[in-house]
Image (cartoon, grey):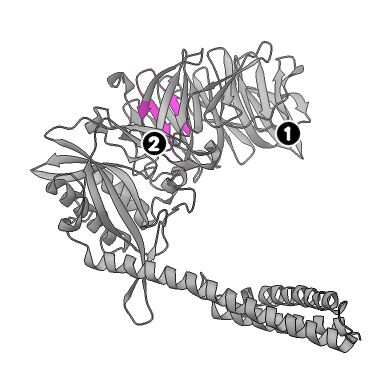
Amino acid sequence: MNGLSIVVIIGAIIGAILGLDHEYRFFTPFDKSISFWASDATGALLWGAVFGICVSIAAVYISKFFARYRNWTSFRITFTGGVLALMAIGVSALGWDYIDASEDRWSTGRITRFQTGFEEETGVETIQGNAATEFKQAILNWYTVASRIASKDVTVDAPSVLPASTPEYAEILGGMLDGSRSYDWDRLTWGDPGEPCRGPFGDPVSFRVLSVDDAEGLVKFKPWDPAKGGLFDRDVSIPPQSEEIAVVAATRQITLLSDADDGTIKYRYACPRSEDAASRVIFVLCKGGGIWRVCGQTDTSGLWIAYPYEAMGDVRPVHIAVNELLDAKPFQLAFDETNIWILNARGEHLLALSLDGHIVRDLVLGGKPVQSTVSGDDIWVGTDKEVIVQIPTGGEPVDHGVPGKVIGLASAEDGIWAVVESNGRRIVGRVSDSGFEPHREVIAVITGIVSDGERAWVYGPNGLLRIDIDGSYETRISRSLAAPIAWGTGAIWARGSAPGYLLRINPSDGSQTEFKVANKIAGIGTSSDAVWVGDSEQREVIRITPSGTISGRWRVNINPEQILFDGDALWVADPDSSKSVVRLPISLNTR
């Protein structure tokens, strides 16, 4: 074995030992159940050995370079290279220790100051800003209550919560803090690209209010969202202030609380977006009974978490069939000109509601509903039992067996169009009083179907196909399409190529037009003269004319995945919400 090999082996061993020692001393796992030896030990040995090898080779070759000018023996070259290698590895290890220790000292000092602030600055007199003391106190009262909700000391409907907030606001924000409304976190964007503050938090949280300032007019935010190219501008309209309404901008810190080894409370950053881990939100305060209470709030990017309907002069949506849908997952709505029909993915029931929101019919289908459509006076429901149920108005349900899993249903002049999957084949056919009649087997993957009555369009990853009543078909477009897709106002409507864009497809020639109408499209519905788009980011429904012009917006404060307009009111369903169906009489809201 030559001298170089010996130096390299020794350098690799010493580098591996020093790397293992360094990583062990600075090992801080996120999960205490994970040991150092199970997670970081192999990596520490590997990078330490590689570092030692590289330094040793470099040291020996440096020695050889200087040996040209002196008459050195091979042993002396190897010995000098080994000494240089050991010195370089040792100095590097000391430097790495100093760097990590400095980072730890800085982080520990910052967290110590952070914890001291939470323990000492808890009164209204410590809050900065130009807002009146009563407004500062109202914000402090809410955050005191919010900390107790997050720690599960109180529930959102506890008497101690009502003096700090309205019941509607407490239900939304409290549910996000205690984990019962975790789905609301998914739509939020945040104010700093460095470290997004995603919830719900695993540990209890506490808050400290740094400042409260008056706000008016438009409030500007600079949120961050990768889907929108990073940082972008958002202007938020706030309600006019009055003797009963106040609007403030509050800057606060959020900390995670956990038990330290000595039994004390340990404070950790929940949202470290800035040097002082602070972020700004807008609060709307409403006065009732002589008390200022929180009735609305944005997140740190300017999105309304709890929208202040009354303060904004808007009509509040009415939650429908709350008890009946408490554990439901309403994933489709249908309207037969008399009733609103609701499909529930978590059961075998089909509910019919009157137009004023009362349950008038509760049918047991014999299988879980998967698709529905209305044709003529009948509603048709496909189930997971390879059955399509025909429900005449005021009549008894009739079952029609089909040769496979129901993929999609759409109205036809006499009965309905249906897509079923059987042994990997997609079959498009018609269902009428006489049963299922296959029209065409389509090789392409089909995920849904829409129709204008005479013709059907099936869609999927391979594009859009038109199928005529005689069974012939023609490719209309080759771009991939997925739900939500709807037929209405003489066109097919779908999501466009970018977030918030609505795609209009002309069924006669397949030409396409896109319109920017929302931030993030969750649902699409149609009526005789308009398209209705649900924006999951803003929690609103937008009315679009056939030409692509926005003609109205209505806040619904749930994720508008399913949208239906009955001529007087909007019906919106959110499969993931605890109060999942709302009705909004838009004739009363012309904003």
Task: Name the residue tied to disc 1.
Answer: 445
The span picked out in magenta is: 554-576
User: Is residue 360 among what the camera can see?
Assistant: no
Q: Residue furthest front?
A: 69
Q: Position of residue 290 (x, y in %)?
A: 8, 43
Left or right side of 575 for 68:
right
Is 446 a magenta residue?
no
Left or right side of 178 for 211:
left
Left or right side of 356 for 272:
right
The residue nearer to you, when weighing 255 against 74, is 74
- For badge 2, the amino acid type reads Val
Quadrant the N terminus occupies: bottom right
Task: Name the residue tied to disc 2.
Answer: 581
Label 2: element kind: strand
Q: Position of residue 492 (x, y in %)?
A: 59, 19
Instruction: Give me the residue at 29% from left, 58% from top.
Output: 207
